[in-house]
Image (cartoon, rainbow, N blue to C red):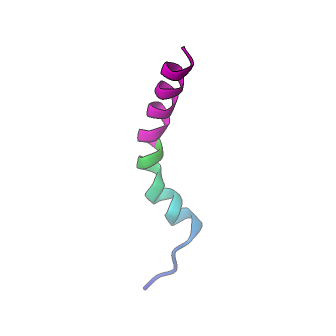
């Protein structure tokens, strides 16, 4: 079992961030309008 490093965590989170970032920006734009 290999060590789970920071770069591995970032690689796992990248697709989640790419999805949540535009959703979060859109949600903020809707809430503040």
> In percent of the image, x 49 and y 36: which residue is there?
21
Q: Nearer the viewer, residue 28 or 14?
A: 28
The spot of residue 8 in percent (x, y) is: 50, 65
Q: Nearer the viewer, residue 31 or 14?
A: 31
The spot of residue 18 in percent (x, y) is: 45, 41
The image shows residue 14, relative to residue 26, as above or below, that is below
> In percent of the image, x 45 and y 40: which residue is there?
20
The spot of residue 16 in percent (x, y) is: 42, 48
> In percent of the image, x 47 and y 25: which residue is there?
26
Q: Residue 26 lies in magenta, yes or no?
A: yes
Where is the C terminus found, in terms of image quarters?
Answer: top right
The image shows residue 20, relative to residue 11, as above or below, that is above
Q: How many marks?
A: 0
Q: Nearer the viewer, residue 25 or 30?
A: 30
Q: Tell me where the magenta segment starts and ends, as one range.
A: 18-33
The residue positioned farthest toward the bottom in the image shown: 1
Q: Nearer the viewer, residue 15 or 28?
A: 28
> In percent of the image, x 46 and y 31: which residue is there?
22
Where is the N terminus found, in terms of image quarters?
Answer: bottom left
Q: Main secondary structure of the magenta part?
A: helix
Q: Residue 27 lies in magenta, yes or no?
A: yes
């Amino acid at each position: 079992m290999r060590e789970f490093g920071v770069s591995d965590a970032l690689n796992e989170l990248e697709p989640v961030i790419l999805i949540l970032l535009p959703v979060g920006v859109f949600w903020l734009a809707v809430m503040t309008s």
